[in-house]
Image (cartoon, rainbow, N blue to C red):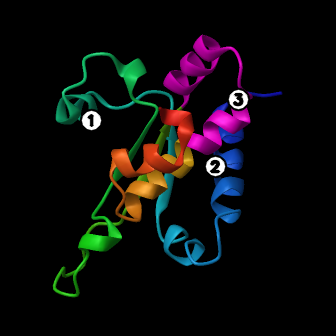
Amino acid sequence: MHHDLDHFETIARATIASLPGAFRPAAENVILRVAEWPAPAMLDDLGLADPHELTGLYEGIPMTEKSVLNMAPPPDVVWLFRQPILAEWRDRGNVELNELIAHVVIHEFAHHFGWADEEIAAIDQWWV
């Protein structure tokens, strides 16, 4: 199995395609980006010192906060970071890599749909 950026993107796109029908149209408007590491500015914005702590990131205005008054807001982006995900996969040692990638994708898209971390943890025991 390959663990390159293309593989991560393939699994992420398959995960998005498998979202329930009500969520899929909104999810398809989000730009998916896969990078080796988060940019230093992303870590600074979140107050993180260790790039391994950030496996994914949602950048945008959650759907629950969007307004018709927002004139041409920048596109929403979901980021996946390959090296931190691989590190978490190695640390856990008991999950499939593809499953971990899918969980990170779903977590970040949940932010797009307006869910807070606490709400995500309540329904997705993976993060507890």
Residue labelled with disc 2: 12
Residue labelled with disc 1: 42
Q: Amino acid at mark 3?
A: Leu
**Left or right: 35, with 48 as reference point:** right
Residue labelled with disc 3: 97
C-alpha span from label 3 to label 2: 12 Å
The question of residue 118 being in magenta is answered with no
Sequence-wise first label, 3 or 2:
2
Report the predominant secondary structure element of the magenta stretch.
helix
The one of 6 and 97 positioned closer to us in this rendering? 97
The one of 2 and 127 positioned closer to us in this rendering? 127
Q: Position of residue 29 (x, y in %)?
A: 48, 71
Quarter of the rendering occupied by the N terminus: top right
Q: Position of residue 116 (x, y in %)?
A: 33, 52
- For label 1, count other residues whose C-alpha is less than 10 Å away and answer few (under 14), some (14-19) or many (20+): some
Q: Which stretch appears magenta?
A: 82-103
The question of residue 83 being in magenta is answered with yes
Vertical position of residue 95 compared to residue 20: above or below = above
Sequence-wise first label, 2 or 1:
2
